[in-house]
Amino acid sequence: MNEQQRAERPERESERAGRRVVVVGAGMAGVQTAVALREQGFTGTLTLIGAEPHQPYDRPPLSKAVLLGKAEESAFDIDFETLGIELRLGSEVTGLRAADHELDTSKGPVPYDVLVIATGAEPVVLPGSEGVPGVHLLRTLDDAARLRPVLDARHAVVVVGAGWIGAEFATAARSAGCEVTVVEAAERPLAGALPAEVAAPMAAWYAECGATLLTGARGAGVEPGRVLLTDGRGLPADAVVVGIGARPATGWLAGSGVALGPDGSVTADAALRTSLPDVYAVGDCASFPSARYGARLLVHHWDNALQGPRTAAAHIVGTSPGGAEPPAYDPVPYFWSEQFGRFVQYAGHHEGADTLLWRGDPDGPAWSVCWLRDGVLVAVLSVGRPRDLIQGRKLIEAGTPLDPGLAGDASVPLKSAVRQ
């Protein structure tokens, strides 16, 4: 550090100490942003605003332990008071007036110097199901609380959507003894997430678990006690759980000047800054440019909500080891899902890949899929083969070329399939 930098440092630190950072959204991304700011030396006023009245909590347990009554809640084990993080819960943010550096909320205006948008995603509602008794979503702690009596009573349940959340709920409902039918408009489960040949083996998992999977089945409507399909069938349903996707919760930003993409996401840059000065965005509500994949990514998964806040905090505080510019945000996306007795993990981004390699028998209990582009591993899906995922993720991060013959041999560790 030279003499000029030493002279400027106290002034910058004084400016940071006097600033007010407001984080909108008290889920994983919002909480981790607030914590990361304190860990990285921010000493100014820090406020975390959440629409729900509950203490901030983690969402993955909602479709598992909380739903099955094995846990009452999944609150983060964080001492917000000691960290000097002011919580404003049960406060819905309704608008942003950037020119005034002020938020409009259900409890009055909130000024900010730096704003972080972390409002996450909201579930897509099945058209025609609004207000129908017995129709449920599974996104919040209150949603899980409303569904627990359904599982306890072992009701007949129809799940609309065979995506990740649909599969996880079907797994929980079957373990509770419910009769479960899953309705999917596409011809296979996970149609929007995985190629047909990769998703096809997963269809058999439903029957193994005792659930009925109806593909190519479109809903025509929902009425109390029944789901109607376009082919004229009516499915008895004591409860209906809708899991047909999620979209960024950014409707409140209309007219604010924050640029949104066609998918509704906040279009953040590589530092997770938005189109407005002093406004950042993290987590499920924000897309970011990936130099690694040459595409703008919108990642609706827990790991993104954990990792992104560290980058945003570093750029807000303006510090990095050695005084260098904080790094750009360009992670290898990662997520996991527990369903039908299997632990499924995925790392990377397979769109644009030119080679698909199987490792193991897809009809067996454990297998993996690798995607390569120009010989370089870009994504890996693991079912019961955690070593493939761990090694594959490191190879993706390093941009390592693989020998396709070795990478497609399940007996060869992925780390040993590096092209010589």
Image (cartoon, rainbow, N blue to C red):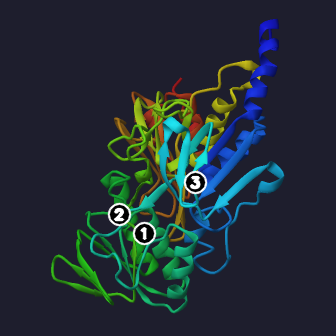
Kindly identify which residue carries mark 2.
189
Give the amino acid at mark 1: Gly
Residue behind mark 3: 25
In this view, the mark in front (1 or 2)? 1
CB under 8 Å between discs 1 and 2? yes
What residue type is disc 3 on?
Answer: Gly
Q: Is residue 222 above or below residue 344?
A: below
Q: Name which residue lies at 74% across and 19% down.
A: 323
User: What is the distance, in whole Å, between disc 1 and disc 2 at their CAs?
Assistant: 9 Å
Residue flagged by tag 2: what amino acid is it?
A: Pro
Crowdedness near tag 3: few (<14), some (14–19) or many (≥20) residues, C-alpha within 10 Å: many
User: Mark 1 = which residue?
Assistant: 166
- The span from disc 3 to disc 1 (Cα, nearest Å) is 25 Å
Mark sitting on residue 55? none
- Extreme residue in the top direction: 3
Is residue 387 visible in the rendered image? The answer is no
Q: Relative to residue 344, is residue 57 drawn left or right?
A: right
Give the crowd class for mark 1: few <14, some 14-19, many >=20 residues within 10 Å.
Answer: many
